[in-house]
Amino acid sequence: LGNAMHTVMAAPPAGKSVLVMGAGAIGLFAIAIAKASGAALIIVLEPNEFRRNLAKQVGADLVLDPTQPRVEDLIRQQTLGLGPEIVFEMSGHPSGFRQAFRLLRNGGHICLLGIPPGEVPLRWADDVIFKGATIHGISGRRMYDTWYQCQTFLLHNRLTIDPLITHILPAAEFQRGFDLLKEGKAAKVVLRWGVE
């Protein structure tokens, strides 16, 4: 939750159009935080159907499979041809990074939390410089500030996160939890100690 909070608060989404790229656990938390923060439109790109369904449950307005044709056209249509004002790149997938910069609106903010496996070539002139893009590199959370922000959101019931805790297992079944995550059939797995 802390990484998602830090990412979203780097470019506060109130009243803005947002694109979340990657709906793993942190991306899903980012969707919930963006919704609770008053984002005007939340679009999500996620290839896994299970996670796409969770994205809808926590507040996404439009959820798309990035492997389908015309995805970028659909996103531009939803943003009046301009692209999203804020992109939260959570996937770390190289094609996702390039797509994030391509779709970003002129003058927009892009927050990069996903970690690509290597170098990612970009069209720096067209997709960053001439767009006037602001890039936020996110590394973990800001000690104490992020925790206090999370606490405030949770205490005041601003976050819809219950659907993201998809499994509660006895600690002895930890391997099953890892398997569910690896198979893309879980978001957050809670392990309970002292329970059979």
Image (spheres, rainbow, N blue to C red):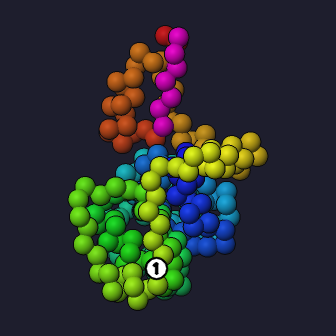
Q: Which residue of the protein is positioned furthest toward the front in this rendering?
A: 143
Residue located at (34% from left, 67% from top): 97
Q: Quadrant of the N terminus?
A: top right
Residue located at (57% from left, 67% from top): 11
State whether residue 173 is above or below residue 9.
above
Q: Position of residue 84 (x, y in %)?
A: 51, 76
State whether residue 33 is above or below residue 106.
above
- Quadrant of residue 151 within the rendered picture: top right
- Quadrant of residue 37 within the rendered picture: bottom right
Element at label 1: loop
Question: Is residue 75 part of the magenta span, yes or no?
Answer: no
State whether residue 194 is above or below residue 38.
above
Q: Nearer the viewer, residue 105 or 129?
A: 129
State whether residue 140 is above or below residue 192.
below
Q: Position of residue 103 (x, y in %)?
A: 41, 77
Q: Which residue of the protein is positioned furthest toward the right in this rendering?
A: 156
Decide if residue 149 is on the left or right side of residue 119.
right
The residue wearing badge 1 is 133
Q: Main SS of the magenta segment?
A: strand
Decide if residue 37 is on the left or right side of residue 53.
right
Look at the image and tell me whether residue 58 can be seen: no
Q: Position of residue 113 (x, y in %)?
A: 43, 57
Residue located at (63% from left, 50% from top): 145
Which residues are the magenta region? 188-194
Residue located at (51% from left, 29% from top): 190
Q: Kindly identify the amino acid type of the residue bearing the numbered disc 1.
A: Ala
